[in-house]
Image: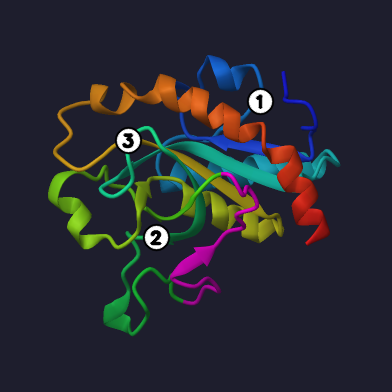
Amino acid sequence: MESPGLTHDVMFVMAAEQEYGAHLRRRIDPVIVGVGPIEAAIGTALALERRWEAGRRPKLVVSLGSAGSHRCAVGSIWQISGVSWRDMDATRLGFEKGVTPFCDHPAQIALPTPLPDIPTATLSTGGQVIGDEDYHAISADLVDMETFAIARACQRFGIPMIGLRGVSDGPGALSGIHDWTGMLALLDERLAHAVDLVPSAIERMRTD
């Protein structure tokens, strides 16, 4: 069931079923694209292509799920103002770190942040699970494994995207998957409240 005011004009995207809890299930039916940049890019592009061919091109994509952080409190919810790709490094060829050679994207892609009640943060996407000293090499506030890939797929289709992330884990060494899953029930509830704000955000984006 979708929240009041949400229609097929909005496509919600999540990485894994584990993040899709009871509160979100009462509100949205997301596309589960898979974990990591490659799966997320493929899954998002295929979903957008299918909707396009069916005459149901979404006006907005909302990417939501969990993230790690060494700055933001565990359990907090953030709107993504900019996302970068930490795995891409072609600096030896003269390209800025994070920029794919011969592509048209900057090192950090700016995203709309139309939800005034949710704070903003920057995010770094990559294929590695980050923990402990790994954070020292990352300037972004949050880390995940999918948002940059989803944003690039949306750019190819000319569709705006909002990024919403809840902090599931923070600084320190991760000792196993339970360090990630332990916060997912709380993040599900808090992300669901953020989803309730999306209809008003759509109206705000239309009038800006």
Query: Mark 3 or mark 1, which is nearer to you?
Result: 3
Give the residue displayed 56% in from the left and 58% down from the top.
Answer: 152
N-terminal-most mark, 1 or 2: 1
Query: Mark 1 or mark 2, which is nearer to you?
Result: 1
Q: What colour scheme governs how the chains and residues are painted in the rendered image of this protein?
A: rainbow
Image: magenta residue range: 102-117
Disc ID at residue 28: 1
Helix, strand or loop under label 3 = loop
Pointer 3 residue: 74
Disc 2 residue crowd, few under 14, some 14–19, many 20+, Cα 10 Å: many
Query: Mark 2 or mark 3, which is nearer to you?
Result: 3
Q: Give the distance between the C-alpha atoms of the residues marked 1 and 2, in whole angstroms.
A: 28 Å
Q: Quadrant of the N terminus?
A: top right
Disc ID at residue 139: none
* Nearest the eye: 125 or 135: 135
Pointer 2 residue: 85
Q: Is residue 116 magenta?
A: yes
